Image (cartoon, rainbow, N blue to C red):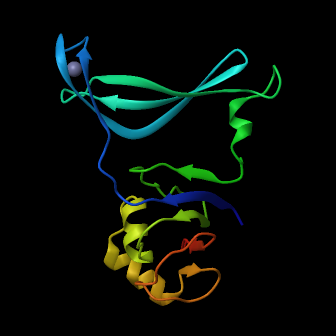
Amino acid sequence: MQTKKYSLLLLKKQERDTVKKQCKMCGKVTIFTDTTIRRHNANGKNIYQFAIYKCPKNHSWNKKLDIYKSFTNHVDPQTLVPSEFKAIEDGEKLSLSAGIESYEISITGAEGNFRLDRTLADHIEGWSRTEIAQKIKSGTILLNNCLTKPSQKLAVHDRISITIKK
Ligand SMILES: [Zn+2]
């Protein structure tokens, strides 16, 4: 049986950071807002982390956050992230693909109040909260291998399993 594994970090919605600076595309000083999307670029021995900011006209600016050295000359930045679980980025939605029979989502952090049904509706493409609530009640969606209720609050180390009917 093919299972796809994901990790999900649940953080409280915060005021997004803004920076006032010149936008080269707009040709004027404007407000750039943090999209909270992060990118990593490898450049020789260094790995750079960037925050992507956007101006109101959607032009991007990459703010350099951190530089960290890779362990050897030949480290692939991909190997720094546990490869088994793919992180679901903030604002990203998981699209369920054909041929995958089950999904496992590991909660790597839950800062705040996150209901199981609402969280899944926020992170799975094409599933409404009502559909998700039914799947939780029917046991298609399990929490830590147990039946639970749609309003169940999520905590760190929780594991959500989703079985896809053929
Ligand atoms: Zn601009």
**For the point 54% across and 71% down, which residue is it?**
164
Q: Position of residue 110 (x, y in %)?
A: 50, 66
| Displayed quadrant of residue 4 | bottom right
Task: Determine which quarter of the picture holds residue 18.
Answer: top left
Q: In the rendered image of this protein, does residue 91 appear above or below residue 141?
A: above
Report the side of 70 relative to 61 (left or right). right
Image quadrant of residue 30? top left
Please give left or right for residue 110 compared with residue 58 in the image.
right
Residue 97, given in percent of the width and then of the height, sits at 52, 55
The quadrant of the image that shows the C terminus is bottom right
- Where residue 79 sits: x, y (%)? 74, 38
At 27% from the left edge and 23% from the top edge, which residue is drawn?
Answer: 59
Where's ligand 1: which quadrant? top left
Q: From what the image shows, is residue 44 above or below residue 150? A: above
Q: Is residue 99 visible?
A: no
Q: How far from the left and from the top, in percent, is residue 73?
A: 81, 19
Q: Identify the residue shown where x is 36% and y is 61%.
A: 126
On the rendered image, what quadrant is the N terminus found in?
bottom right
With respect to residue 23, does 89 lie above or below? Answer: below
Query: Of 160 and 99, which appears nearest the observer?
Result: 160
